[in-house]
Image (cartoon, rainbow, N blue to C red):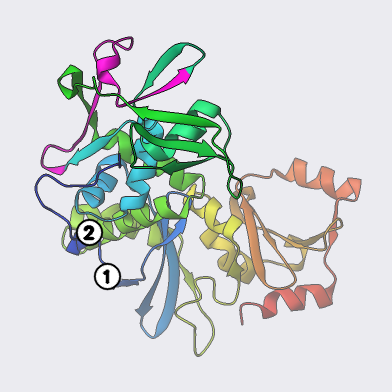
Amino acid sequence: MKKSLAFLSGICLALSSGVASAVTLNGWNVGNPTPVGATGLVNATKNIGGVAKVSNASIVPNASHVSKILRGGVAGVALTVAVNELLDGIDWVMDPANNQIRYKVKLDPSDPTGSEFYYNSGNKKVYISLPSTELCKTVLNRTYIQYIELKAGDGVGYCNVPGESGALLWFYTNHNYDPSKLEEKILPLDTASQKVIDNAQSGNTDAQVATVAAAQDILNEAQNDAEKAKPIVQQLEDNSTNCNSENPDPEDVNCGIEPTEHSKLRASEGRPVGKVVNDIQRARNSDIFVQTSNDRFIVRGLNSREHIVSKDAEHITTVELRTAKQHNKLLNQGDRRFATQAEVDLLKSFIK
């Protein structure tokens, strides 16, 4: 048996709205999203009076956004993985017209007519209804077992160790199988979509295909809907910085400070990561410190925020609230020290 993506409505093409494209929002030229967990992080540029501004924003799709993408046939692998995890290997089909997954289960678990296969355990037949590719791993509980399918006679296949001969367990066709004994049930597509989001948040790249496509779709809709654009534009304005370079790189959101993946993750969580350049620009020597454990810069910004920047010009992270009392304690303990003039000059050079 196979998990099916046979869409009952015959929809097999990707949503045109999910295709990556350049978007302009209130003067901001927004790039295509890149995945940070289940979030789509976008960089953007804007030119005001000859001054280039750069920024970023986090687009966080919800289950209904992802369902829209999955209904269109995008990220089928992510959907298959998510539904198989939720249904524990039960066969299913997608019904996009009704925004749901359909599957069947036995009315009576002890009724052998509801199982396609059986195997012998001593003198007892054990009935089971699972995809053939899952039988060995599930029944024998050994991940390195493989299923070999045969067509001859009643034996439909057996389990063995890859590269070795000899069956560990035979499976047979159950001729009493009666599909009418199965009860059809429904899994809402949004439930599967939330599982896709959870998988994307855990770093699953197949799932991130779906969440990034959903983020792009949100951007595309926002371009033609002022209300939908408002929260994204607000993020861009809040996170914006001015590039002082005569030839700013529009792809470099931090004007010379390269964000790490950890920094991007913190940005997606709402931390004021985009303020790093402004805070470095305004920082006095007395606002710049060095961590003694790893030689990284610490820049004390407004509202007790701190930015951690490496001497390779990488923005490591932003700490949203480090009070003066906490800072002074770390300074007195020797965990951080004042930066030398040469170090201050090096840090400032990152944004020139």
Query: Can you see residue 195?
Result: no
Residue 103 lies in the magenta-colored region: yes
**Residue sitting nearer the eye, 159 or 321:** 159
**Residue sitting nearer the eye, 26 or 87:** 87
SS at mark 2 in the image: helix
Quarter holding the N terminus is top left
User: Image height check: is 85 above or below 217?
Assistant: above
Q: In the rendering, at what x and y percent does residue 296 appear?
A: 77, 63
User: The residue under label 2 is which amino acid type?
Assistant: Ala
Quarter holding the C terminus is bottom right
Give the magenta-colored segment's residue range: 96-120
| Real-space CA distance between mark 2 and mark 1, rounded to the nearest whole angstrom | 9 Å
- Is 69 left or right of 320, judged from the image as shown? left
Read off the residue under disc 1: 23
User: Image height check: is 320 above or below 309?
Assistant: above
Query: Can you see residue 33?
Result: yes
- Is 333 left or right of 51, judged from the image as shown? right
Q: In the rendering, at what x and y percent does residue 94 appear?
A: 20, 40
Q: Earlier in the sequence, mark 2 or mark 1?
A: 1
Disc number for residue 222: 2
* Quadrant hosting residue 237: bottom left
User: The residue under label 1 is which amino acid type?
Assistant: Val
SS at mark 1 in the image: strand
Q: Are marks 2 and 1 in contact (CB under 8 Å)?
A: yes
Residue for point 85% across, 50% down: 331
Residue for point 76% across, 41% down: 325
